[in-house]
Image: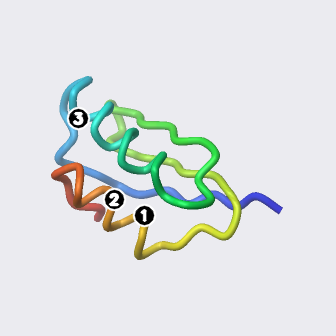
Amino acid sequence: MPETITYSVPGMTCDHCKNAVNGELRSVAGVETVEVDLDTKLVTVSGENLDDRALRAAIEEAGYEAA
């Protein structure tokens, strides 16, 4: 059963931010979809057996902090 986790990433301001976060999160095992909304600063990740620590690390790797 797919699960969904949403993170607030207040540092995102542009398409470059969106693409960086999206790219890093898609490389995490189990991730099927990533939706980044720059207006609300929310990132929604869906997939199987998602690992919160790995997802937060991927957001940090992109240069941002998940609140």
User: Which residue is denoted by mark 2 in the rendering?
Assistant: 58
Amino acid type at mark 2: Ala
Q: Please tell me whether mark 3 sits on a helix, a strand or a loop.
A: helix
Circle count: 3
Residue 47: x and y in percent read 66, 55
Locate residue 65: give its quadrant. bottom left
| Residue 58 versus residue 33 in the image, above or below | below
Q: Earlier in the sequence, mark 3 or mark 1?
A: 3
Task: Return the disc, 2 or 3, that comes first in the chain's sequence.
Answer: 3
31 shown above or below 14: below
Spot occupied by residue 4 in the image (x, y as percentages of width and height): 63, 57
Instruction: Check the image and name the residue furthest to the top.
Output: 15
Residue under the point 54% across and 51% down: 45
Secondary structure at badge 2 equals: helix
Residues marked 2 and 3 touching at CB (< 8 Å): no
Image depth: mark 2 or mark 3 in front: 2
| CB-based contact (under 8 Å), mark 1 and mark 2 | yes
Q: CA distance from mark 2 to mark 3?
A: 13 Å
Q: Amino acid at mark 1?
A: Leu
Q: Categorize mark 3 by other alpha carbons within 10 Å: few (<14), some (14-19), many (20+).
A: some
Point 35% across, 66% down: residue: 56
Could you tell me how far apart the alpha carbons at marks 1 and 2 are, in whole angstroms? 5 Å
* In the displayed structure image, the side of residue 63 where residue 7 appears, left or right: right
On-image quarter of the N terminus: bottom right
35 or 41, nearer to the observer: 35
Mark 2 packing: few (<14 Cα in 10 Å), some, or many (20+)? Answer: many
Q: What's the residue at 28%, 38% (across, down)? A: 20
- Where does the image place residue 46, in percent across and percent down from the top left? 63, 52
The image quadrant that residue 2 belongs to is bottom right
Q: Which residue, given by chain and number where applicable, does mark 3 sit on? A: 17
Q: Which residue is mark 1?
A: 55
Residue located at (26% from left, 23% from top):
15
